[in-house]
Amino acid sequence: MRVGVIGATGAVGKELVDVLARRRFPVTQLSLFASARSAGTTQKTPFGDVTIEEFSMERARKLDLALLAVSGDFAKAHARALAAEGVAVVDNSSALRLEADVPLVVPEVNGHAIGAHRLIANPNCTTAILVVALEPLRQAFGLKRVIVSTYQAASGAGAEGMVELERETRRVLVEGQPAQAEVFAHPLAFNVIPHIDTFQANGYTREEMKVAWESRKIMGMPELLISCTAVRIPTMRVHAEAVTIETERPVTPEAARAVLAKAPGVRLMDDVGAKLYPMPLTATGADDVEAGRIRANDVFGNCGLDLFLCGDQLLKGAALNAVQIAEQMKLPVPA
Ligand SMILES: NC(=O)C1=CN([C@@H]2O[C@H](COP(=O)(O)OP(=O)(O)OC[C@H]3O[C@@H](n4cnc5c(N)ncnc54)[C@H](OP(=O)(O)O)[C@@H]3O)[C@@H](O)[C@H]2O)C=CC1
Ligand SMILES: N[C@@H](CC(=O)OP(=O)(O)O)C(=O)O
């Protein structure tokens, strides 16, 4: 299959190439696209050294599958046009996620929505990690309300976010100077910032609203009551989420653990006596979303549950989920 990764030099794009190789996706020809500034450079990949090409529709329309990891504006300009050319497209940006004719998919939750569609949207990273754990709990106990607070890594802001966190941490520790900010709203080193994406009229940020909008669409629960506080923290990778739910039917921590232990895409890590709980250090590079710190939340009587999640947002929140979607799309089988 002729596969193209568009945005191949970025945080998500590099992971996409690795995931394609790791999952033995049937790639017969891999094309890597980025902007003009990267064109002509060489990227080492598990498929060998590949020269980065500047994106053009002429080149991309020859692909069987295009994995887009650029911006929303780029997706608006090219995603539908590529799909119309017969290219299967999975887009990582937020541009098309709420469009009625574009399925928004986390395969463990709503893989059935893929059908014969040629253009699929990959969800917001925080949302994908959340719904993998929420869906099995919903199936077992019903779901009334969700309150989530997030702890999001610098790489959520792309390759430049990682560079800034490393540079500014050095500035403080090595040079003894105060940290500065360009990518983030404030210096991130030795700080936490309750501001990801732009503020909306209702006081929430767009990142927080995406968690609500997208969870409702993926889970097919347009009325789901859900509130999010999204916070950037100075880790490199993995988004953590403190989640409180109110269920429709009574829930116990033991029953929730039994459900999550069997849930696809979830790794139960919940043994506080052994200091076993989800953490960015253990979730980094892992496909499964870690779930732990499961306990009854008495605020909601016998229908309340608290839990803590950690998911590698460059994998389940982006590249892994996108390749899982591609695996379920109806694509030409190479001879
Ligand atoms: N980071 C994350 O955790 C997640 C990101 N996403 C989404 O994935 C997308 C990519 O994010 P991320 O990897 O973090 O971003 P990066 O900033 O790390 O990478 C952006 C990529 O886009 C390329 N690019 C920029 N302009 C063009 C262009 N005109 N034509 C072709 N390629 C171009 C860049 O190439 P060059 O190096 O040449 O500039 C680079 O490869 C975004 O839409 C983001 O919202 C989704 C889920 C999680
Ligand atoms: N907003 C996420 C990453 C991201 O790119 O999300 P989205 O694809 O929804 O814009 C973060 O900063 O951690």
Image (cartoon, rainbow, N blue to C red):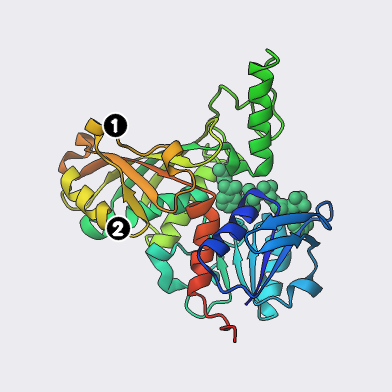
Secondary element under disc 1, as helix, strand or loop, is loop
Judging depth in this view, the residue of 76 and 27 nearest the camera is 27
Residue type, numbered disc 2 = Ala
Q: Quick one: 44 or 82, which is closer to the camera?
A: 44
Numbered mark located on residue 275 in the image: 1
Question: What residue is drawn where x is 64% and y is 44%?
Answer: 158
Q: Residues within 10 Å of mark 1 (few under 14, many from 20)?
A: few
Q: Quadrant of the C terminus?
A: bottom right
Question: Between residues 44 and 314, which one lies in front from this camera angle?
Answer: 44
* Few, some or many residues within 10 Å of mark 2 (<14, 14–19, 20+): some
Identify whether 116 is placed above or below 7. below
Mark 2, secondary structure of its residue: loop
Q: Nearer the viewer, residue 145 or 4?
A: 4
Image quadrant where residue 28 sits: bottom right
Say left or right for 225 vs 211.
Answer: left
Query: Quarter of the image containing the N terminus?
Result: bottom right
